[in-house]
Each structure stands twice: as structure tokens, then as C-alpha cells.
Image (tube, rainbow, N blue to C red):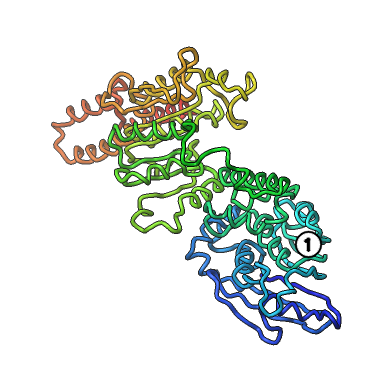
Amino acid sequence: MFLTITITGSADRPATDLGFLLHKHPDRAQRFSTSYGVAHVLYPEADAQRCTAALLLEVDPIALVRRGQGKGRGGAPDSALGQYVNDRPYAASSLLAVALRSVFTSAMKGECAARPELPGRAMPLRIEVPVLPARGGADLVRRLFEPLGWTVTAEPLPLDATFPEWGDSRYVRLVLEGESRLAEALRHLYVLLPVLDDAKHYWVSPDEVDKLLKAGEGWLEDHPEQRLIADRYLARRRALTRQAIERLALERLAEADDADGEEIDNAVDEEVDTEQKPVPLAVQRREAILAELRAVNATRVLDLGCGQGQLVGALLKERPFTEIVGVDVSMRALHEARRRLRLDRMPERQSERVRLLQGSLAYTDDRLKGYDAAVLSEVIEHVDPERLPALEYAVFGAARPQTVVVTTPNVEYNVRWETLPAGQVRHADHRFEWTRREFRQWAQEVGARHGYAVTFEPVGPDDAEVGPPTQLAHFRMTDDDGEGRSEFKTQDRNRSHNKNNKKNNNKNNNKSQGQGQGQDTDRDRDRDPARGYGTSDGADGAVGSSAATTGKEAAA
């Protein structure tokens, strides 16, 4: 990937001043090592009338894989096979933005010891980026750069010039032209290249807010797309985005009052805690789940529907949880979970405790069997009601952990949310929200069908009239193999006993004929539906097939 910066000049202001500004001599090609490859700076042309500097970044694909880029940690979010095929070596992204900052550090700061008057001078610039990922298309490119005074050419690149009917790709050829100070132009690129790519190749930590505000000083506070820029630059981390927006608003107020930001933001004495902040419901929910898992001494835990990995992160902080598996159907959510958990930077001993798997809870999955506990935290309400039986069987009938913890919103409590319109669910993706009675009925029926005892706990303030905002059910597997055992449990045991009976029948065939009556008696007992056992092979196998079919129909 590369970009070029061109300046036009005259006899009294030669274009070769660009070499002073960049601190790179036009007569030499230079190379610089970066975390993901090698950056080259060279000048294809350099005279008084026109001077062009090119930054060429050679990305090392092996370094991308070793540092986690190929596994989706901060890379292109749609590249499930990113370890093998991705656009990172060719398309301008945060990799190029970081190279700009590291190679042109002094130029970005506006420093030039040899010619101190140059950094403050606006110059006729032309910047070209041949391949730029633009999630939002050419229109978004113009919305981002035109308010900064640039004349923008954003030419969509075809997927394949040989097959024009395939249409355009999400990449554009970008050309920016206008008069600007070089330091400002470099800061525009440093922020907006990863914004357009909508991805970062590294973990976004809180100090990224400071980097954004420093690079955006003088232009970001008044940009019409300020929120979009902050949101994408900070990898859609809401807390960081909110912090950046608040600080930008404070800077605007300070500029209007001709004061320093700290002088305005002085209403609260930081040494005095004037108000106790309420604990967010999400935090209370995680604490309630952890308490239930601790109570049963669970060590191997499934987080089913793990989303962005908040519960996985909480489990990792406690040593008794030795194996933690997060499962989600969304690959994008798993990518974000890896970023949040910083799996690429985690010590080996710690990383061995956690796995993230893609999977759907509508299907049985042998990878989920044999665990102490499973958690369905705010998951079931995202499932269509007609698909709940499939989820039920996959978790309680097939995976069968010793303990299952389920949380879901209490729809009765919605009247206490002042900002939630009457009759509206809490999240647009919720397929339903249950009352306490509906949730208890569902949980008790599931427990009865699959051999689990169920208890219920409130999460959050337990309102005397409408109950808590979140309701929690704790399923514990019982040892009772009689009444209350599910047909699904019977079906699983049928398979196991079929194998055992086959072995026993083979042994019995080698015994004397005088023992045949006992063998027939055993077969009759094995076929007794009241005992829940399977059948032996041969003519009796039809009964086992019929029972299995009945179980599948019930699961559907």
C-alpha cells in the first residue's frame, strides 16, 4: 500500500521544501522498520516546480498472522479466512496511518528546525491514495474530507475491470487537492484512513481518546461527522466514544469563552465523591451469574451467546474457572470479543483457559458436552418462539451441563423505564419479553422435561409491584431417573443402551442354549418404555428408531 504527497512551487518557494517539512532528503530513498513490515520513503520527482514524496508500506503477511491480524483481531471484520486471504497488504488502513505517524513524526507535529517558517505555511497539496477501503462509499469519503477544505475525487474501483457487470468494489481511488499546512493534512489522513476502513489492526485502549483529540485538534470539534469519526476511530467502543464527544464539547465551550477546558470543567471537586454512582444493571447481572456459578463450584463454563465477551472477561478474572468457552453465531461479535479480551496479548497460561467458538444454539454441538455449567445471559429473548424448543434440546437435552443459568428481561418492569415507550421491548432485536409468570412456567416445563430442578432469583431492584428488571433461573441437574425425565434424556440413554445391549447380545450368542430364556427376559425388560431403556439390534431395532423419531419431533 502507498500514498503520494505532491507540492507545486515556484522559484522563490521551490517545491523541494517538501523535503525539509518531511525531514527526508529528496536525493535518498530511505527505509524504516515497523511492527508489520517495512516502510519506504522515496521521491519519484523533485524539482523547484513539482515535488512528490511517496510512502510505500510493505506489509509482512507472516507478521500479520503472528500478531493476530489474520485471526480477525482488529482486521477486516468480514474476513473469516483472513489468515490466508485479506486486503491488508494492499489497501490503505490503520497500518498506513500508523506508518505515517512513525515515519513523519516531526512533520505531523509541525516541527522543522532547519526551516521553522515552513510548517505554518499553507501550500498547494495533492495527496493520492490509489486503493482506499471506504465503508460507506464515495459519498462518505466526500462527507469526511470536503468540510476540511479539500477538493475530493473518490473514484470507485471495479471488482474486476474484465467483468464490468460485477459492479464496483468497496474500494476507491482517492485524490485530495487544496491549500493546507502539511501537518494538518497528515493529521486528517491519520484519523480518517482507519475511519473509512472501519477497522483497527491493534487493540483500542483508553489512550486512543487522547490520540484522537490530539490529531483532531483544530478541526474535529466542528466537523459535521464528528460522532461517526469518533465512533469508528475508537472501534465502536461506546464508553470511549462518549468520553471523546464530551471532551470535544468541552473544548468548544472553552474556545467560545476564550478559556482553558480545565477552567470550565471545575464544577466538581475530584477529591470529594458528591454522589454514589448506581451500579449498571449489566454489572449486577454478571455478578449474579458469577455468584450462582461459585455456589455450585463450577470450573468448566460455557457462555452461550457470549456476544462481545463481557462475561467471559469476568470469568477469566477468577482462577477457579479453569476452562471458559464463549459461543456465538456472529463472527463479528467474536472478533470484537477477541479485541476486548486482548487474546493476542494475553499470557499463554491465561489464554489456555479460554476458547471462542462460532456456533448456533439451534443445533446440537458435540463440542459443548461435558461442562459443569452453561450460561444463557440475555439470549433466549433474541430467539424466535418457534425455535426455542430447538435451543432447549441443544442445551438441556444434548449438551446437558450439570448447571444452567438463564437470565432474561422482566417485561413487567418496563413501565419503570421512563424513556421506554409503552408496549415497546427494550431492544429492537428482542422477539419477546416475558412476565415473571411466563418465564417461570417455561423454565419449570424445561426442567421437568430434561431432569433439572429450577430456582429463581431477582436481579436488580426487586420492585414490590412489578418485580426486578431481570429475572434469573438456576437449573440444577437432578439424580432422579424416574418421573420428570424428558423424552430427550430417554432418547440419549437409548443410544447408550443400544450400544451396551449389542455387546451383551454378542456375548449371549456364545452362551449355551439353556440360557436363552434369560436372554429373552432381558430383551423384554430393555424394550419396556416405562424403564426408558433402548433396544437391541435386529427386529427390535424398529422400536428404537421410532422412539428416536418421536424425540426429534418433540424437539422440533
Q: In this view, does 258 lie above or below 497?
A: below
Q: Count residues near mark 1 (Cα–Cα under 10 Å), then give few for <14, some for 14-19, many for 20+.
A: few
Of residues 274 and 365, the one nearer the viewer is 274
Q: Is residue 47 visible?
A: yes
Type of amino acid at the residue the image marks with label 1:
Phe
On the image, the x and y values in percent for residue 402 come to 32, 33
| As drawn, 325 above or below 530 | below
Rendered position, 65 above or below 297 = below
Residue 268 image-quadrant placement = top right
Q: Which residue is drawn at 77% across and 82% down?
A: 45
Residue displayed at 68% across by 60% down: 193
261 left or right, relative to 375: right
Callout 1: SS? loop
State left or right for residue 118 relative to residue 361: right
User: Would you place residue 309 above or below residue 184 in this image?
Assistant: above
Residue 29 point in image, percent of width and height: 65, 84
Residue matched to label 1: 163
Q: Residue 495, image x and y in percent?
A: 34, 35
Looking at this view, name the residue that lies furthest to the top.
Answer: 465
